[in-house]
Image (cartoon, rainbow, N blue to C red):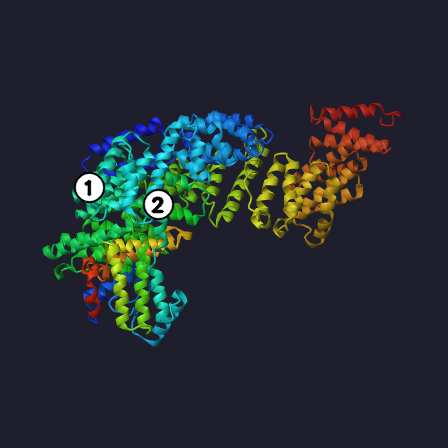
Amino acid sequence: MIAKPESPDRAATLAETRHQLAELDWQNDLPQALSLLDRLRSADTPPPLEATTTSSEDIDPDLAQQISNPCLTPAELSARFIKLHDHLPARFDPVLWNSMLSAVDPAAAEAAPEAWCGAVMESLQQRHFLPLNVLRLIRDRLPCEAFFASEHWQQALQDWPQGNFFQALLMRGVPSIETALTLLRPLDVTTQQFDTLMALVQQSGQALQQGEQQQAFDALINQVPHEHKPLLFWQRTLKLMFHGCIPAGAEQGRAAFSQIAQMALHFFPQDGQLWFLRAGFDFHTQPPEVARATAIEALVQAPDYRRSLLWLGRALLASDKFEQATLVLQQLQSWEPLNLECDTWLAVCQARELEQRQQRLARSGSLEDACDLLQRLLDLNSFNRPLQIPAALAEEPDVQALQWALQAQQARVNLEQPDEALMLQALDTAKNPTVRLALWREYLHYGWTLQDLAERHKKLFECYLEFPDSFLINYHLGMQQQLKGNHNKAVDHFDKALTVEADYFDCLFRAAQCRFNLQEYDTALERLDSCRQLAATHLPTLRLMALTYVRKGEHFAAYWYYQLLIETQAMSRTTLADMRGYLLAMVNALAELSMEQRHDPERTDILESVQGTMDLFERWPRPDDFFQHREGQFCQLCTAEIHDLINRPAQALMLLGELDAAELHPDWLARYRRLKGRCNLALGLYQDVVDLLLAPTTEALESAPDAQSTLNQSELLGDALLYLGDVEQAHHWQMHALEARRRQFGKDTEAFADWAESFLGVYLDAARMAGNSELVIRAGNAYLEEVRTLGPFHLVVCCEMGKAHMALDNPERGEHYHRLCLEYAAYYPGEFEDFVEESRSLITESPKGALS
Amino acid sequence: MNERMTPYLNSDKLSDTQLWLLAPSAMLTVLNAQRHDMLFPLRDEDTPEDRADTKRCLDQDWDVTDAKTLAETVEFLHQAPPLWQAMQGWHPYSSDEYQVLHQGDWPDSLKNLLTMVEQYGCSMPAGDLAWHLGRCAWVVRSACQVGYIDEDDAWKLLTENGNRIARAFNSWAEFGMSYAIGAQYFRSQRFNAESIQRYRSHLTTLLTHPDSPWVRLPWEAYTPEDVEEAVSG
């Protein structure tokens, strides 16, 4: 297996860490060493999107939209894809890269896999992390043998002479080793490596499975080459030998292991796995001091292979250095929380350490040793261990206080209520600051059960005065303030706490939440970055990141995080439910933004952003039963609504059409009808509007005449009937809408007048556009009746009514309205001049002069 | 550590060897809040209700209804465990290869197994053997309690079981870890901190609590050669 070439930054960090670790006195500086390893681990976590992408201004704004355009040829698509890639630095999150590849993949690869593979491969093979992803995708796209015979494969192998990764790919892709060897034959160097390696592994693996250790060793030892061979060879060889040479009596195996390990480390002096095996071997076969030294050397040489901490921890345990062993094993446990081996050795460590402390107390009988023991029990959550405290010390305030703290801890773990009076008494009497801090810690846990918020806050504040720089106190105060909604104050406490413990996950996450609520999105993202480095797949972190990007208007970034969320939970039962949640959040955020754009037409950036995201969004895979579920239907409706909001009624109708086959949830019926009506209306499908809405709206007039949905549907029906030329019906529904609104506004006549002005203005305009004079007159009359306060639109109304009357052979009434228009025009010079001029000309052209 | 241990009184005056032979069942005994210091795994008194309960458990969970089915179950538990086989197939892989495998479109349970083999591959040559042998000890104790076998036969079976354990492991810690790993493997469909928390907690308790048989009885107190002493004890 090849090691990926390290980026210059990464290599520098590793080298620096090696240097720092080598300089340390591990005996005395163990916490510092662990901290260095932890920091390196954080640096190893793939950097999040926003930390590594260039600013959104640097990326072609329509790229997101274009990249998913199915009309592009594979070559064009690849070019666009690469264009985006060029904006991204080398350490772009590979998980997200995979997502991106997956997103692009179906659009082009289905149509012309070979062309797509060629274009992508040609352009991307120079990038160090991409061949792995790209090759995997390409291999999945092409027939197996076509792929391995292709130029891409050969080129990749030549670029990577130690192409062990590709060997692994090959092994997964071909039916047999014979086929693999045939395919590799043209590549001389690699064939030789592969042949040797696989023969070795096959032989030895088979022997091991059959319990023939000696035969396995022979297979391994006899084939150990003297020249430089691939890393994978050494790793596998040592690993296969490891177990066989540990048991007593396996001296021959041990000697062979030492020899091979020496050769392997000569060729690969900084490989973590080789060092891990070497350290493990020494742990099992050498005195603890030697094993400890080897484990330290392993960590110095390969600080990024942290599992070597296991051997360091166990060697320290074997040397009776319990506290140090605990530190080391706890560190490893924090990185591998499901590794029960850490639990096992930590438990052994704890048992032996407490026994040692108990014995020391028994010998000395000192208060210091008693507090020391109790404090340690508290730290280790070991509250139900039977204790033997000398009688002379039992009444000491600090001893009593600590015993209470242990009881409180036990009560907390057992979900029982501790004795508050006893707790307060202990706080009054304890003198030792360390003991007092321990007491406060338990009290603060207890404090969360207090119903009296004022009392809780008072106690917290007392505690803060005593320990203003304590992580715990600031953390709790922060939580308290956050609970109250005082995000500003909360964030101050969280930030202070984080200066003490920078990697406390919950504190980081809460700080991010507060920043988010304070709309300080960039700072929120910084905190979320840190969270992600500690827990890359913590779903609430990913959710908040996505949402933060949505709020920032960076929908493209948000999209990737939503995608990542779905991928993270790909195999989970909750995926479907989560996906609905994500879609809903996304759709609501987009709806909000598109409304913003509607109110501020100048903001074309929002429109573009929304359009781009919508294209991506619609390509998300929907579960089979998506449309059967209430939430899924709602998501679809929201998506269609956004299309409508950004003037894409046809797309909206298409999405709504997908819902037609499903039984729509009753809660969404009104929303669905309104939206479908709007879209049909916008596309001129007036009869469809009537067919859709007439029956349910007529029925609704009886059952819920003032309901908002009835009102909306009435308006749509009115408009559609108007365009269909059905004067009576059109007016009926428009007036129903008007009356319903009047009732809705109630005594707020001013607000109603404002609404009526707009509504009737639109009505009149629609009647005019439909060329229906009778309706124009009706709409105009309604307007003049409802909108009593004179305004510039009255000019338009009067002009249109004048024209309508004239068209209906009623010149007197026509002249009346035209004159009214001219009369009003005096109040609004310069407004609607076209209409005023039209009225003026129509009066002048009157054949009988009757208008004078 | 949140477990309450039953008192370790040894009121039946069992020998250390006998107590040692009972100790492999400790994980299941803690789970059931039963006594570690007597042949029958009792909670309190040996009542007819308790026996009926144990009988039902043996029947439903273990298909043990008499001496013959007990022998079959013991034989089944003494067979090579599946995780061991899986480790032999996979454990030579390097970390990078595991990463590649993890990226495959496998079911969760297989990915979890890969994680286990990767994590424990260098530490656990015995795999999850203790998961089988530990439960075997408990089944034998229970079968004796409900009268499927007499005490002599129980001690013989426990001794045979103990010999296997003593040969395969070097300490209670190793044995306990192997047992917990077996539990983890057993739950590889739902592999998360929550699903293994109970075993993690029991393991810690048994390795630390002064009343735990694993703390009171040194591993070295028993060797496979102690067969005769155990039977006659």
Q: Where residue A809 sits: x, y (%)? A: 87, 33
The residue under the point 64% across, 41% down is: A750
Provide the secondary structure element on which disc 1 rests. Answer: helix
Residue assigned mark 1? A292
Q: Please, is residue A778 above or below residue A457 in the view? A: above
Q: Please, is residue B49 above or below residue A397 in the view? A: below
The residue lying toward the viewer, choosing from A751 and B148, is: B148
Indicate which label's residue lies in the foreground, 1 or 2. 2
- Residue B15 in the figure: left or right of residue A692: left
The residue lying toward the viewer, choosing from B46 and A353, is: B46
Image quarter where the C terminus of chain A lies is top right
- Residue A508 in the figure: left or right of residue A371: right
Mark 2 chain = A
Residue A128 position by quadrant: top left
The residue lying toward the viewer, choosing from A321 and B38, is: B38
Provide the secondary structure element on which disc 2 rests. Answer: helix
Which residue lies most toward the right here? Answer: A848
Residue B144 in sight? yes
- Residue A777 in the figure: left or right of residue A104: right
Residue A551 in sight? no
Amino acid found under the numbered disc labelled 2: Gln
Which residue lies most toward the left here? Answer: A364
Q: Where residue A730 sits: x, y (%)? A: 76, 42
Image quarter where the N terminus of chain A lies is top left
Residue assigned mark 2? A206
Which residue lies most toward the bottom here? Answer: B48
Q: Label 1: how many residues lie within 10 Å, few (<14), some (14-19) or many (20+)?
A: many
The residue under the point 36% across, 45% down is: B90
The residue under the point 33% across, 38% down is: A200
